Every structure is written in structure tokens, then in C-alpha cells.
Amino acid sequence: SLPAVGSSDQPTTWPISAWATPRRTLARSSDETALREIDRFCREEEIETLVVGIPRSPEGVESAIAPRIRSFAEKLAGVSSRPIEFHEETLTSDEAARRLRGRRSRAGVDAEAAAVLLEDWLAHRGRESA
């Protein structure tokens, strides 16, 4: 499956303590289908920026799957007019599982992990603009 989509209603100038809400998880049957679904969701929800998680090892080295993620993001850039930003996603699933405390469907953890990723991206962006 594709990582889930998180959504924040907060403007980009909102303070660092931003939070995000898990929205949905997309079942991925093909890149083309996933790209269309993501683009449609972004249009419907008026998403301004796409944040794509890049997993890293504890040593900070990008994981073996990172090139596939970057390749998919490149395809996504080809169908979407929205800017795409990459952000460190290490431990987002662990934090999502902690937040869910046992309610652990794969889709639920993926959706919550997307929200964790978006919250961290918003906080990082807030620190950069402060």
C-alpha cells in the first residue's frame, strides 16, 4: 500500500505546535492508479504541498527503498502541479503505533504515520522560519 495521506488545515505560517489528521490510505495496484488517486485527492482537498517521507537508518543513511520512493515522487511531480518536499520519516510508524495503543491495522498505522510525518514537517518548517 501507499503511505497514507495526512492533512493539516493550518496555514504555513502557523506556530510550530501544528498537528495533522490522518485522512486515508490508498491501496496501490499500480503507479498510474496511485498517481491519479493522489492527484484527485489533492485537488478535492486543495492540498498545496506534497510531503514525501524518506526513511533513513539510525546512522542517517537513506534506506534501500529511498530510490524507489524518489522515483515515485518524480512521477508524481509529472502529474501534479504541487511542489514536492522530502522529509525524514524514520520512526514515524513507531510513533504512530504508540499513539494508536493497540488499534493497529496496517492502514491505520500508515495513516497515523503520515500524520506524524506531516506534523514533523510543519514543526521543522516553523523552526526554519522562526
Image (cartoon, rainbow, N blue to C red):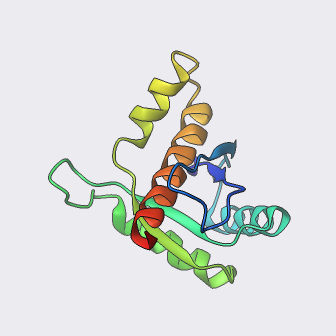
Of residues 20 and 96, the one drawn nearer to the viewer in this rendering: 20
**44 left or right of 78 in image:** right
121 lies above or below 46: above
Please state the total of marks drawn on the protein image.
Answer: 0
At x 51%, y 70%, the residue is 72
Task: Tell me the quadrant of the picture where the C terminus can be found.
Answer: bottom left
Residue 93 can be seen in this image: yes
For the point 65% across and 54% down, the residue is 29
User: Residue 23 appears in which quarter of the rendering?
Assistant: top right
| Rendered image quadrant of residue 108 | top right
Position in image of residue 10 (x %, y %): 68, 58
Asked whether residue 24 is in view, the answer is no
Please say if 37 is above or below 97. below
Return the x and y of residue 45 as percentages of the image width and height: 81, 61
- Where is residue 67 drawn, in percent x and y? 35, 68
Q: In this view, does 11 lie to the left or right of 85?
A: right
- 74 left or right of 22? left
**Relative vertical location of residue 14 with respect to residue 17 in this rendering, above or below:** below
Q: Where is residue 80 in the image (x, y as percent from the top left)?
A: 68, 79
Q: Between residues 125 and 55, which one lies in front from this camera angle?
A: 125
* Residue that protrudes farthest toward the right in the picture: 44
> Which residue: 51% across, 79% down?
74
